[in-house]
């Protein structure tokens, strides 16, 4: 996995730099999302992994499917990935690009998992507290997981705040086992 990230990083950074220079961060997000969606289609994925299909044929196939949904730079990007044999790295490139974009925009992603549904006011309050703590705008994704029994678990980057009853029970079980 680390190797894929290492190889994908220069493509993501170059794409981000190009998007930044052209003030087209959202446009590139949309193009990368579109490419990722097309490449994840099982029938297209079968062609991408077909060793009998040469780069030119793959390029014609993908550009034919995508039509005019890519601008000139997007088409060039796709061609570079195809001819360098890096098309399978697109999910990693996209993820790294989005991370660079969020960092540039001062945004951090948060995952909030609650045992019970949260009201909009509760979510807003929690997001406001997270924004104050991190000094950045927070995009929160909220989920409900009844197995937590009660409380909330918040994941921001590599930090986890586990204030759930399930987490406390697991910690207690681990302490009793030792």
Image (cartoon, grey):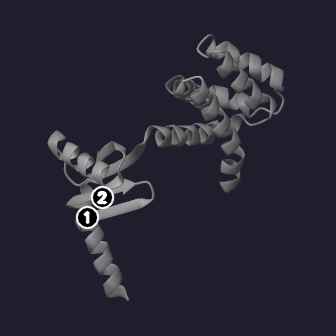
Residue indicated by mark 1: 163
Residue 173 in the image: state x and y as whole percent: 31, 79
> 133 or 68: which is nearer to us?
133
Q: Which mark is residue 48?
A: none
Residue at image x 82%, y 20%?
A: 56
Q: Does the CB distance between marks 2 and 1 fall below 8 Å?
A: yes
Residue at image x 43%, y 42%?
A: 106
The number of callouts visible is 2
* Vertical order, 155 against 48 (above or below): below
Left or right of 15: which side holds 148? Answer: left
Residue 144 in the image: state x and y as whole percent: 27, 48
Residue indicated by mark 2: 153
How crowded is the residue under tag 1: few (<14 C-alpha within 10 Å), some, or many (20+)? some
Mark toward the start of the polypeptide (2 vs 1): 2
The N terminus lies in which quarter of the figure? bottom right
**Residue at the far bottom in the pictured view:** 178
The kind of secondary structure element at disc 1 is: strand
> 86 or 71: which is nearer to us?
71
Residue at image x 78%, y 35%?
A: 85
* Vertical order, 99 against 35 (above or below): below
Left or right of 128: which side holds 138? Answer: right
């Amino acid at each position: 996995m680390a190797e894929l990230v290492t190889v994908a990083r220069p493509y993501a950074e170059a794409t981000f730099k190009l998007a930044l220079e052209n003030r087209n961060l959202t446009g590139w997000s949309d193009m990368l999302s579109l490419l990722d969606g097309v490449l994840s289609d099982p029938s297209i994925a079968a062609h991408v992994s077909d060793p009998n299909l040469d780069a030119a044929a793959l390029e014609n196939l993908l550009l034919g499917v995508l039509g005019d949904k890519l601008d000139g730079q997007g088409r060039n990007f796709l061609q570079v990935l195809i001819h360098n044999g890096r098309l399978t790295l697109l999910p990693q490139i996209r993820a790294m690009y989005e991370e660079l974009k969020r960092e540039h925009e001062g945004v951090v992603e948060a995952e909030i998992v609650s045992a019970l549904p949260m009201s909009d006011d509760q979510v807003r309050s929690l997001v406001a507290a997270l924004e104050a703590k991190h000094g950045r705008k927070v995009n929160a994704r909220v989920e409900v997981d009844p197995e937590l029994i009660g409380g909330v678990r918040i994941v921001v980057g590599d930090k986890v705040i586990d204030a759930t009853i399930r987490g406390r029970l697991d910690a207690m079980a681990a302490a009793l086992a030792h």
